[in-house]
Image: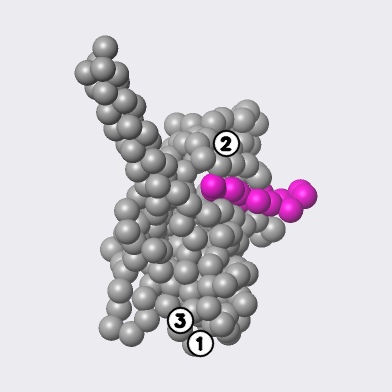
């Protein structure tokens, strides 16, 4: 009985240790900035040579210029939530060479990410860490045009995508540290109106892909660079 008891105890201890390590690996990791700052400001620009894509069964939207600006409150040098205002230009959609993407009244909110390893984190759709937030009556709208005339419209309203993720990584520079993020968010809801955009039905199959480099600043004018890293 004693050897069996010892074996069982060792097995339970091993499981407990494994569970503790797993919990540690899945811990939340805030963005870290210089401690004296009460607030930080960020600018994100898509990585050179890449595009940002909105993929649906109705067709795809591809943008050659994608960027965002945002701000966040820092508490003791840690940022747990950040709000980003996106901008998309030079886009094509659903087979049309030109498309306008308007984001008026809409932002992206990211809450505290989950650690993957040192210097690398993830915001997960299933973990409800990624949010599209639009004020009443507003939505992100995609409008392809032909000869300057609107063809149809797809709208993306407030929501929390159900799957996919954003992976954030530290990316050092000779001076300040910045971060990169790689987006593969799935389960996005959208509604199309007219033509190739859809027949006013709500779909849940959209995906969003893109790579961005984010720089952090201490001032709203975005002139004074500061470090921003994941532990």
Rendered image quadrant of residue 65: bottom left
Q: Image point 38% across, 72% down: which residue?
A: 178
Q: Position of residue 66 (x, y in %)?
A: 45, 62
Q: In the picture provided, is 51 more to the left or to the right than 71?
A: left
SS at circle 2 = strand
Where is mark 3, residue-wise?
226
SS state under label 1: loop
Q: Which mark is residue 189?
A: 2
Residue 219 lies, with reference to residue 47, above or below; the image says below
Where disc 3 sits, the SS reads: strand
Which region is colored magenta? 129-143
For the C terminus, the image quarter is: bottom left
Looking at this view, is 129 or 69 the one in front? 129
Q: What percent of the width, then of the height, locates residue 80? A: 56, 60
Find the residue positioned furthest to the right: 136
Marks 3, 1: nearer the viewer: 3
Q: Residue 223 has which mark?
A: 1
Name the main secondary structure of what is drawn in magenta. strand
Query: Considering only vertical position in the picture, is 6 above or below 46?
Result: above
């Amino acid at each position: 009985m004693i050897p069996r008891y010892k074996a069982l105890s060792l097995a339970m201890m091993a499981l407990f240790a494994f569970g503790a390590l797993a919990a540690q690996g899945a811990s939340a990791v805030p963005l870290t900035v210089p401690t004296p700052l009460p607030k930080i400001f960020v600018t994100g620009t898509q990585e050179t040579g890449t595009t940002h894509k909105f993929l649906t069964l109705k067709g795809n939207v591809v943008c050659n210029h994608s960027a965002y600006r945002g701000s966040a409150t820092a508490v003791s040098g840690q940022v747990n939530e950040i709000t980003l205002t996106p901008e998309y230009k030079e886009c094509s959609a659903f087979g049309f060479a030109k498309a306008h993407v308007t984001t008026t009244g809409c932002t992206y909110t990211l809450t505290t990410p989950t650690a993957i390893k040192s210097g690398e984190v993830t915001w997960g759709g299933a973990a409800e860490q990624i949010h599209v937030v639009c004020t009443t009556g507003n939505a992100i709208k995609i409008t392809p045009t032909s000869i300057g005339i609107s063809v149809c419209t797809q709208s993306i309203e407030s929501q929390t995508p159900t799957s996919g993720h954003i992976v954030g990584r530290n990316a050092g520079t000779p001076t300040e540290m910045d971060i990169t993020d790689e987006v593969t968010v799935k389960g996005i809801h959208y509604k199309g109106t007219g033509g190739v955009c859809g027949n006013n039905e709500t779909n849940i199959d959209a995906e969003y892909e893109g790579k961005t480099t984010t720089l952090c600043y201490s001032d709203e004018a975005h002139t004074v660079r500061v470090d921003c890293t994941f532990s």
